[in-house]
Amino acid sequence: MKKFIAILMGLVISMAAQAAEPLTLWYRQPAQKWVEALPVGNGSLGGMIFGGAASERMQFNEQTLWLGNETEMGSYQPFGDVFIEWRQGAPEAYRRALDLREAMHRVSYRADGVQFTRETFSSYPDQVLVMRCTADQPGRHSGVIRLTDMHKAKIYAEGNKLIATGALTNGLAYEAQLWVLNEGGTVAAAGSTLTVSKADSVTLLLAAGTAFANDPLKHWRGEPSHARLTQRLTAAAGKTFAQLRDTHVGDHQKLFSRVQLELGAAPATVPTDKRLAARKEGQGDPALEALLFQYGRYLLIASSRPGGLPANLQGIWNADLKPAWYSGYTCNINLEMNYWPAELTGLSECHEPLFQWIQNMAVVYKRTQDERVKTSKGRGWSNYSTTNPMGGTSRWGVHRPNSAWLVQHLWLRYAFTQDKDFLRRVAYPALKEIVEFWEDRLVAGPGGTLITPDGWSPEHGPVMVNGKLVIKEGDRTPHPGTSYDQQIVWDLFSNYLEASEALGVDADYRARVAAMRSKLLGPKIGRWGQLQEWMEDVDDPNDHHRHTSHLFALHPGRQISPLTTPEWAAAARVTLNARGDKATGWSKAWKINFWARLHDGDRAHKVIGELFKVSILDNLFDTHPPFQMDGNWGYTSGVAEMLLQSQNLKPETGNLKPEMEKQASATQVSGFKAPVYLLHLLPALPAAWPVGSVSGLRARGGFTVDLAWRDGKLTAATIHSTHGTRCLVRYGQHTTQLDLPPGSARQLDAGLQPAR
């Protein structure tokens, strides 16, 4: 055993020693454009830092600054900017960097023989954004600091503070306060600016907020933010910079450090933009791919924390008064994709804002008077495709399955954590009411099946043009039995059945839902071997649309798998080949997950190459185009799926082929009882990652998994169990059964035998 541990740790330490700042984005020049700036965030307050030497700009956002209301869409709004103009000479030895481990932005350079350093972070514990400017000689900070606003707010100076107060056209009051604290020298107000003279160091504390209340029962309005912001800044100003920094770093690392991924050494002397340029030209850089994986986790921590709103289409960062797609919540893939990495990569807490928003939308859409989405029997709810935090919508398209897809996330929280209290209080009631919604809507289909009556396949459909059937972009013509709808309803029913049984409740209704699920029209294979997108066999093999909605059953659903439904999996492969690897950024991210679920690591990695080539900006943001964050989070999920997959093997879910049912039954013979979870190790490891390790990935059933591999082969695995759930571990053709006590772990070798 000791020898095994020494080998595993030696591999990890050796790879870490070779890597030069593997979790840092760094550059030799300031940002010139917004999409070159680097992001910091505390879940609600975000900053995009340009990193100029003598001239710094930090554009900032606060996640509740929204136009619109419960009936009108509006859009997410930029808040303002902080500008600093220092009286300094030309910089030398310039460097700006974003350290993902500490969630810290740093700028360093020399000017006039002085070494200057600037550190910036956005603290969740203290709810302020902090920037500290220091020098290695006293009295070297002189200049002007300005606070600007995007909505004509009143801006004034008060002592060492700059304050902006205003209101949006929907009546939402907002405020920003910037406090400037100096050590040595002076700070003086001059109109709406602050002038710093000969300070040794300067610390900026920024707080921003609105009168938004995250509660539909309060009609989305609460108290003005002035007192709250003042209290935050007063408390922060009473702490040293070291105290603020250490509290922030500790809070961030509690989440971020849960997962570590090593795919190779990062070059010590090549900045991130140059590495990206080389990757776009086809040069291999596994360490950059690992960096982008961890960047997605960093971005989720920075834009989605308990007590706040869910991450929107751009996380929390936006500089446009009219952002693309409102920077809203689009529920036919984008919002859901934002949260794919949450449970997989140890960020369960970051999932919570989405749960609260789902509960809020249930309130809004059960009381709506909009006839297009109002439920006929008063059970459950649905919505349009795109929504703001208050339920206001663009009305572009009714999207009836959105609530069923959204509550999948509630089920995932339970599946990964086994938290029965959450299942009982939150997930189960939400699942049941959406099941009831679909019980009321399903109609009889061909051959005694049940089908959805008026679905669509985002975001196109078959129409007749001049007597010829074509697939038209953006078409929302209702179609019965659309595969996308059918697959989401199947997933909903399956999640409900497992939830009901886990809690031991509603046995009679569970039987009724099981009967309905057995009658659902399932996936169909069409004339050219494809998985059909519509009930009719009308798919165009030359259709390269960005959405591949009819593969929901492959991912993020679980109805299709090479292990359980090989025929459907083969048809899904035909569909993906026809759609091609080129698409928008988020679409390529989804395809990485698809190919991972098909256990084709090399094809998944080929799509990763396409993503880097076209869809990753210099600051590593994903672009549709334009910039949107879902592709970053979809990528992180895809990499995790390439390394570890998990599903419930319970036969009653109806997702087992005979060979897997035999394995699940074997666990019963050995004294196991359902549910049994399959943990599939390295199911889609590409040849481009021949050596590596990962620790902390989560699996359904309450497991944490650590893996190491060399020459493309598993060398070691450790399975940690939090709840004592039973599992079947698979690697290649090897399988082993584990029945671990709660809080225990089992170390396995390459053959899945206990390590010695």
Image (cartoon, helix red, strand yellow):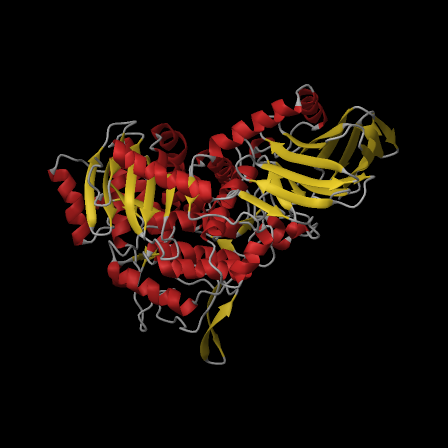
Q: Tell me, yes or no, if residue 142 can be seen here.
A: yes
What residue occupies the far front of the structure in this picture? 113
The part of the image, by quadrant, that contains residue 161 is top right
Residue beneath the point at 17% across and 48% down: 661
Q: Position of residue 97 (x, y in %)?
A: 61, 43
Which residue is at the front of the view, 167 or 220?
167
Q: How many marks do you count on the picture?
A: 0
Residue beneath the point at 54% across and 62% down: 614
Q: Position of residue 318 (x, y in %)?
A: 65, 47
What residue occupies the far right of the structure in this picture? 190
- Location of the N terminus (image quadrant): top left
Q: Tell me, yes or no, if residue 699 can be seen here.
A: no
What residue occupies the far left of the structure in this picture? 669
Which residue is at the front of the view, 585 or 548?
585
Q: Position of residue 83 (x, y in %)?
A: 77, 40
Which residue is at the front of the view, 241 or 678?
241
- Location of the C terminus (image quadrant): top left
Q: Position of residue 395 (x, y in %)?
A: 57, 54
Q: Is residue 603 above or below residue 639?
A: below
Which residue is at the front of the view, 25 or 418?
25
The part of the image, by quadrant, that contains residue 737 is top left
Q: Is residue 138 above or below residue 625?
A: above
Residue beneath the point at 42% across and 51% down: 638
Q: Is residue 275 above or below residue 342?
A: below
The part of the image, by quadrant, that contains residue 750 is top left
